[in-house]
Image (cartoon, coloured by chain):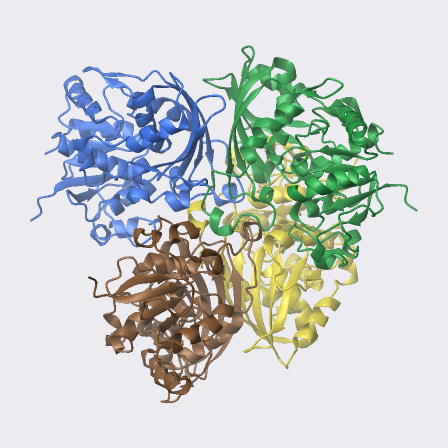
Chain colours: A yellow, B brown, C blue, D green
Amino acid sequence: MSSKIKVAILGATGAVGQRFVQLLENHPWFEVTALTGSERSIGQKYGEACRWVLSGPIPAYAREMVIVPSAPGFEAQIAFSALPSEQAKEIEPELARAGYAICSNASSCRMWEDVPILIPEVNPDHTGLIEIQRKQRGWSGLIVTNPNCTSTGLTIAFRALHDAFSIRRAFIVSMQALSGAGYPGVASLDIIDNVIPYIGGEEEKVETEPLKMLGRFNGQGIDFAPIQLSAHTNRVAVIDGHMVVTSVEFRRDVSPQEAIDALAAFSAPEIVAGLPSAPKPVIELRTEADRPQPRRDRDSGNGMASVVGRVRKDPLFHIKFANLSHNTIRGAAGGAILNAELLVEQGWVR
Amino acid sequence: MSSKIKVAILGATGAVGQRFVQLLENHPWFEVTALTGSERSIGQKYGEACRWVLSGPIPAYAREMVIVPSAPGFEAQIAFSALPSEQAKEIEPELARAGYAICSNASSCRMWEDVPILIPEVNPDHTGLIEIQRKQRGWSGLIVTNPNCTSTGLTIAFRALHDAFSIRRAFIVSMQALSGAGYPGVASLDIIDNVIPYIGGEEEKVETEPLKMLGRFNGQGIDFAPIQLSAHTNRVAVIDGHMVVTSVEFRRDVSPQEAIDALAAFSAPEIVAGLPSAPKPVIELRTEADRPQPRRDRDSGNGMASVVGRVRKDPLFHIKFANLSHNTIRGAAGGAILNAELLVEQGWVR
Amino acid sequence: MSSKIKVAILGATGAVGQRFVQLLENHPWFEVTALTGSERSIGQKYGEACRWVLSGPIPAYAREMVIVPSAPGFEAQIAFSALPSEQAKEIEPELARAGYAICSNASSCRMWEDVPILIPEVNPDHTGLIEIQRKQRGWSGLIVTNPNCTSTGLTIAFRALHDAFSIRRAFIVSMQALSGAGYPGVASLDIIDNVIPYIGGEEEKVETEPLKMLGRFNGQGIDFAPIQLSAHTNRVAVIDGHMVVTSVEFRRDVSPQEAIDALAAFSAPEIVAGLPSAPKPVIELRTEADRPQPRRDRDSGNGMASVVGRVRKDPLFHIKFANLSHNTIRGAAGGAILNAELLVEQGWVR
Amino acid sequence: MSSKIKVAILGATGAVGQRFVQLLENHPWFEVTALTGSERSIGQKYGEACRWVLSGPIPAYAREMVIVPSAPGFEAQIAFSALPSEQAKEIEPELARAGYAICSNASSCRMWEDVPILIPEVNPDHTGLIEIQRKQRGWSGLIVTNPNCTSTGLTIAFRALHDAFSIRRAFIVSMQALSGAGYPGVASLDIIDNVIPYIGGEEEKVETEPLKMLGRFNGQGIDFAPIQLSAHTNRVAVIDGHMVVTSVEFRRDVSPQEAIDALAAFSAPEIVAGLPSAPKPVIELRTEADRPQPRRDRDSGNGMASVVGRVRKDPLFHIKFANLSHNTIRGAAGGAILNAELLVEQGWVR
C-alpha cells in the first residue's frame, strides 16, 4: 500500500505528456494513478495509444494503464496538465472546481490575475494567489502554471540579477529547440540546414511572463515588475535545450564581475532547496568562452538547472550573457513537477 | 585573344578561394590567369591540390592551372585575396606595392585608416582612400577590402535606414553558417543538435566595421558613423547563409511602415546598379511571417541580395527585423568581385 | 500566341507538384495552362494556396494562376500527376479516358500490365504499351508512369550493366532524403541525430519496379527481367538526393574494370539523347574514393544524372558500388517531364 | 584506503579516452590512478589539457589528475588504451612486457595471431590466447582488444545466429555515427545534409574481425569462422550509435521466426552475465516496424546492448535485419571495460 500522493497526467500521450510520464517514474512523493487522453485514445492502454518519441522505452508502470477522459472522475489529488491551450482553458478550471490541484504547462490561464506563473526558486510566495482564486471562483482545487519554456531559465537568472541590481530593460534573442513545438511539430524539410526566425505567439509570452513572475504579490494580486523586454524568437535544428542570449540594462551601472557574483551567490529559498526535483546549484555558471551549448549542457542538474555563460560587458546596456535550459524538463514537465512539490511542501496539497 | 582583365586568386584552394574560382567562371569582364597557394601546393595542378568542398565539379578552366606562390610575379591586374589574415597582412601590401589591385576578403587591413571596407551599394566613394594609400605608401597598386561576412547584408539594410532616419544604436544577434569558419572549420561533433554561442573575434568586427562603412569620406579619411552597436554572434547547423536579427533605435521615432518604405525604396547608386554582379533589387523585402530563412533565401539575387523580413515594432528601441545574406557569396568572394567591378567602373583598374 | 504544348500539373501545391511548377518554368516545349488542387484550394490563386517549400520564389507564371479541380475540363494535352496514390488511382484513368496524356509520378498504376514504368534512357520502347491500353480500355489519352524515386538512378546503372553482362541478383540498401516523404513528411524530432530504418512500402517497390523496366516489351506486354533483388530502405537527415549502395551478381564473372567500362560507355538511345531534359552524360562516373555524396552531387546534370562511384570488387557477389540521384528531380518531376518529352518525340502527343 | 584495482587510461584526452574517463567514474571494481597523454599535455592537469566534448562536466576525480607519459612507470594493473593505432603498435607491447594488462581499443594488434579480439558474450574463451602470447613473447602482462565499433553489435547478434544455424555469408551495410571518427573528426561541412559513402579501412575490418571472434580457440590459436562477409560502410549525420543493416545466408533454410527465437534466447555465458558492465539482455529485440534508431536506442542497456529489429525474410538470402549499438560505449570504451572485468573474473588480473 503506497502512501504516495496520487497524481494524474492530462494529455499524457503528447510530447510533454511523455516527459511527465518519464520524469514521474520512481518519484519519491508522487504516484501516477491516471493518464488522460483524447477521445481517440480513451480506453486504450497507454503503451498502445502512445507513439513514444523520447529516448529509452516507455516506463513499465505506464505501459498497461488505461487512458481515461480529461474530466473529473479520476482518482488523484494533483493533475499535471500537458493539454493543448484551447482544451486547457475549459478543462483546467473545471477540474480545479472539482478539487484537483492543477499544475499546468498550458499557456491559457497563465495571465489570469489570480493564477500564478510559478518557478519555485523565483516566486514561491506567488502561491498566495491560490487563496484568492479559491475565494473568487469557489474552487476547492487550484491552478498554478509554469511559464513558457523560453522564459524559464532566463527568469531564474533575472531573479538573481533583479534582486541585486534592479533590471530596467533587456533584449532577448532565443534559439529554440524543436521539442518545444511538440510532436510531430516542425517538419524536417523546414529546419535541416536552416533557421526559422519566427515562432507564433512566442515573443509576446517572452516579453510578458517574466514581468509577472518577477513581480510582487501584494496580498491581492501581482504587481508586475517594471521591466521592459524585447524578444526575437527563432527555431534552430536542436532536439532539446533552448539557448537564449540577452543584453541587460540595470537601474545603475553594473559590471560583469558584479553580475557574475550575484549569479554565483544565488540560491533557492530554503523551502525550495530541499524539494526532490530542485537542482543544486539552481544557476550553473560556466566560464569557458563557448558555453553553454544545448547538447552539452541541457542535462545539467538533471535538466533542471539554468546554465549561464559568457557574462561580459555590453556596449549599449550593461551586461550581456548566454543562457540555456532544458525546454521540456525545466521548461515544461520538470518545472510543473517542481511546482507540485512546492505545493505539497507549502501545505496546499496534503 | 581575350580582352578581359586578368585576375589572380590568392589562397585559391581554401573554402573562400574555391568560391572565387566558382564565381569567376564565365565572368564577363575578368579572366583568371593565376591561382596561388601554400608552399605545399605550389607546382601542383589545381584539380589535384584542391580538396573541392562546394557543390558541383571544379570549373574546367581551373582544373589544369598550376598553383604559383602568393608573391609578385604572376600576370594579373587584380588579385582577389582569400588568404588567412596573418598571411594577408604581409603579402597584400607587398603585392599592392608591386602594382596589383588587391580586393581582399581578409580582415587584416580592414581597419587601416587608408584602406576602405567597401560595399559598392553602401559606400562607393570610399575608394577615394585609394589616392591616400598610394600617396602615403608609394603603392602603384591598391588594397580594398570587403567586410566581415556577418556585417555585410546588415550594413546594406542599415545604409537604407541610416540615410532615411539616422540610426543611433542597434542590437545585433547572429546565427551564422558553418562555411563562415572555412574548411574543415567546425567539427560536426560540435554542431549537430547544438548551437555554439561564440565565434572568436567576430563580435568586435560586427560592432566596428559597419561604423566605418556607414561613415563619411572627408577627403583624407573616414569619419566613422556615430552609431553604437552590440553584437552576440552564434554558430548554428546551417551550411551557407548568415541570419541576423536586430533591434534598431533611431535619432527620432520611426514606425515599422516608415522603415519598410525606406528599405523598399533603396537602390544602388547608378554606377553600381549596372555592374555584372550587382543584384536587383539590392534589398529583397519578404512579407511572410517566417522569412528570410537561410536555406530558402540565401540564393536570392544569385547570393548577392540582402534579404530583410519581419520588420516590426520593437518595444524598447524603434524597430526590429531579420536579415539574411549569403556569407561566402555576398559576404566573401562575391562581395570582393563586386568591389573589383566597381574599381574597373571607377577607372582605378584599366 | 504560343505554339507550345499545353500541360497541366495535377496536385500542384504539394512537394512534388511544386517541383513540376519549378522545372516547367521556361520549358522549351511545354506551357503550363492548368494547376489542379484539392477541394480546399480550388478557386484560390496558386501563390496564395501553396505553402512553397523549395528554394527561391514561386515562379512568376504560376503565382496568379487559379487552381482548378483534378477532373476533365482543363485545357491541356499532357497532365503531369503529383497526386497521392489513392487519388491517382481514380483520377488518372478518368483523365486518360477523356483524352489527356498522363505522365504520372504516383505509384498506383505502375504495376498495371498495360501501363509502362518509363525511364527514357532505359526502356523507351515500353511506350508500345500505350497501344494496348488504348485498345483494351478505350482511352483516347494514355498513362505512363515514372518509377519510385529510389529505383530510378539505380535502374539506369543497372541498364548499362544488364545489357553488358546480364545481372542475376543484387542487394540494394538506400539512404533516402527527406523530400521523398513529401511535406510536412518526416518530423524533425524523428530524424535529427537519427536514422529511420524503415519506409513503408518502399522495399517492395525497389524489389519489383526495376524488373519491369529492365524487362522486354513483347508486343503485348512486358516480360519481367529475370533478376532477384533484396532491398533495405532507410531514411537519413538529407534534404534531397537518394544514396543507394548495391552489391551485384552477374550470370558470369565480371571485374570492377569491366563494369566501369560498361557504365562509362553507356549512352541514351538517339531519340532520347536530344530531349531537352536529358542529361549528358546519363551516368556520371566519379573516381574519388568518397563520392557520390547527396549534397555535392545531387545537382549533376541539372538533377537528372545517375551518379555512380566506388565501383569495386564484392567479396560475395561480383561488384559493389554507390549510386546517387536527385529524388524529386530525376526521381519524380524531372523524370515525368522527360517521359513527356519522349512521348512528344515519339509522336504519342502532338 | 581503496581495495579497488588500479587502472590507467592511455590517450585519455581524445574522444574515446574521454569516454573511458566518464564510464570509469564510480566503477565498482576499478579506480583510475593514471591518465596518459601526448607530449604536449604531459604535466598538465587533465581538466586543463582536455577539450571535453562529451555531455556533462569532466568527472571530478579526473579534473586535477596530472597527465603522465604513455610509457611504463605509472601505477596500475590494467591499462585501457585509447591510443591512435600507430602509437598503440609500439606502446602496447612495451607495456604488456612491463606487466600491464592492456585492454585496447586500437586496431593495431587485433589481427595478431596470439591477441584475442574479445567480446565477453561472444568468445570469452579466446582469452586462452593470453597464455600463448605470454609464452611466445615473454610478457608478464597481456593484450586483449575489442573489435572495430561497427562489428561489435552485429557480432553479438551473429553469435546467437551462428550458434543456432551456422551462417554461411552476409551482406553488411553500415550507417555510422560521427563520434566513430574521433574529434575533431568529420567536418560539419562534409556531413550536414549529406552522407559520405566511404570510411577509410573500415570495410576491411568489418569483413574480417567478426570471423576471428566467431572462430574457435583450438588451444594454440584461432580457427576463423568459415563465413564470408561483404561490407559497405557509410557515414551519416548522427552523433552516437552505429546502425547496420544485414542480409544473412545460413547453411540451411532459416525462417525469420526461427531467427527471432534464437536472438531472443541468447544470453551471455554465466561468467559474463554477472559482470558489472554486462547489459541484460545482451540482445534487445525490438518489434516496432521502425526500430532500432540511433538516437532513441543507443542508450539501451546503458549503451552496452546490441539492439536488433526488423527481422524479416530476405528474398535472396534467408533473413535480413537492422542492428544498432553505441559505438563509443559498447563499440569502444565500454567494450574494453567489460573485457577488463572478464579478465578479472577469469583470474588473469588479480
Judge from the rendering whether residue C281 lies leftward or rightward of residue D329; answer left or right. left
Give above or below for D197 relative to C135: below
| Residue B26 rendering spot, x and y as whole percentages | 26, 58
Label count reads 0
Q: Residue furthest top?
A: D252
Q: Is residue D200 visible?
A: yes
Q: In what quadrant of the picture does the N terminus of chain A appear?
A: top right
As displayed, is residue A207 above or below residue D307? below
Asked if residue B291 can be seen in this view, the reply is no
The residue closer to the viewer here, A21 or D41, is: D41
Q: Give the answer, above or below, for where A312 lies relative to B327.
A: below
x and y percentages locating residue D319 in the rendered image: 52, 19
> What is the x, y in percent for residue D321?
54, 25
Q: Is A226 left, or right, of B333 in this rendering?
A: right
Q: Nearer the viewer, residue A94 or D175?
A: D175
Q: Quadrant of residue B143?
A: bottom left
Extreme right residue here? D1
Q: Quadrant of residue D168?
A: top right
